[in-house]
Amino acid sequence: MSSSRFSPALQASDLNDFIAPSQDCIISLNKNSAGSRRLPIKPKENAVSTKPPEEAVKISLKDCLACSGCITSAETVMLEKQSLGDFISRINSDKAVIVSVSPQSRASLAAFFGLSQSQVLRKLTALFKSMGVKAVYDTSCSRDLSLIEACNEFVSRYQKNQSSSGKEAAANLPMLSSACPGWVCYAEKTLGSYILPYISSVKSPQQLLSSTLLSTVTSLLGLCRPYDVYHVTVMPCYDKKLEAVRDDFIFSVDSKEVTEVDSVLTTGEVLELIQSKSIDFRTLEESSLDRLLTNVDEEGHLYGVSGGSGGYAETIFRHAAHALYNTEIDGPLEFKTLRNSDFREITFENIVRKIKMGKCEYHFIEVMACPSGCLNGGGQIKPVQGQSAKELIQLLENVYAQDVLVSNPFDNPIVKRLYNEWLGQPGSENAKRVAFTLFQPLISVNQFLEETK
């Protein structure tokens, strides 16, 4: 798997941890010389210390640091589980396969085939179900849930910041978004404990949909146990494959390990599936949508928030204005473009103030590893012949803004039901148990060798 498919941030740390796919691992992955920090794979042979080699262990995707080293250069490792072939084989297994589609992937397929996003989701539902998939959902629903928890977390941090002083106040803000796994992985392996406390603890929509699915919806589908489900997501980037195999997102039920997201397919892999079946996707019959965890209203219209990467900054800005200052902001927000379109800011004079003395001047930062955000993820469909990358991004932004009704996450009837019947209130202990996670520093191979001299 070419490392260029991962987000640029994952390739920016200049770690010299490369080993060839044929080399064995000599560092035990169970060894932990740095507290709770996870360890990577081995370095080049000529960089190994004189200590005797330990027993070789099998390297899996969850051991990957996305450092352009052995895992990302060995296609067989990536394809072993997180693959189209594995997805197809699982459909004929004893588990119920459920697919969740991201809005960015939906937009990419819509642009490629010249269809609306609503048509794409209905056609994908028909295609997957014809193959034996039990249900197809839309991650816009879990994104609303993730946004609500992030809004609550930000207001809580801001209030603590205002009632504290010195280091205690500085420890609460700015809050950094956590939905982009490329950014999170980069922060863990290069920025360490210095920056991690500032990252939001809320799970990404991918993971939150799965924890919601496994905790509440399985019984409604006639599935009594979470391990009866094989959950597959369709995502715009390869980084989501790394996120899915994190140890943080595995739990035990009846002495069996249950993975929140079992497999991730990129948009490009779904296109490969469509083309492999030699079907005319444009004329494929459409199916009704599974409304249990899909943002679709009574008339069949899709709804969600604006913003091709997640809409965190805009949603949190509106909610903070209301919750902290009882101010309702109607209409579109006017973001100020800074260095380029990837750097934008918006201020509300009572919320965002200049913080001097070397402190960050912002209270919330939505961080995305890829230029132009998730719509430009490495797993999206590439430009067609004669189309530039810039032209494709512009097309995707236009398609993404069409055919979807902009709606306040707090008004989502599905999310309201989940809180009323299961989660309680935003920020409650039950909500934190399901929707929150922790991020830990990753020790690089070079750091490991230095510490074990």
Image (tube, grey):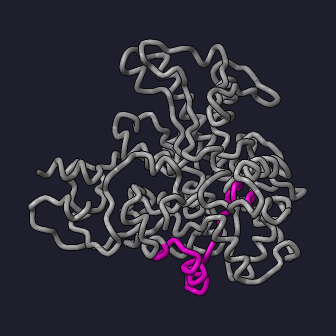
Asked if 307 appears above or below 100 in the picture, the reply is: above
Residue 440 image offset from top left, x and y in percent? 36, 46
Say whether residue 372 is magenta: no
Looking at the image, can residue 239 be seen? yes
Image: 10 above or below 330 = below
Q: Which residues are magenta?
A: 79-108
Residue depicted at x 71% and y 55%: 103
Query: How far across and down, in percent of the image, does residue 453 sit?
Result: 11, 51
Q: Is residue 302 left or right of residue 103?
A: right
Residue at 67 percent of width and 30 percent of height: 319
Camera-side residue of 29 and 98: 29
Say whether residue 346 is left or right of residue 50.
Answer: right
**Where is 354 relative to 206, above or below?**
above
Residue in the foreground of this view, choosing between 385 and 273: 385
Where 38 sits versus 228, above or below? above
Nearer to us in this view, 340 or 243: 340
* Whole-percent x, y for residue 153 in the image: 54, 34
Q: At 65% from the left edge and 20% from the top edge, which residue is drawn? A: 347
Tell me which residue sits at (21%, 67%) in the image.
26
**Is residue 437 at all visible to an observer of this figure?**
no
Q: Residue furthest right?
A: 299
Residue 18: x and y, percent? 33, 60
Does 106 lie within the magenta span?
yes
How many numbered marks does the figure carry?
A: 0
Picture quarter containing residue 169?
Answer: top left
Q: As drawn, is 208 to the left or to the right of 308?
A: left
Residue found at the far front of this picture: 386
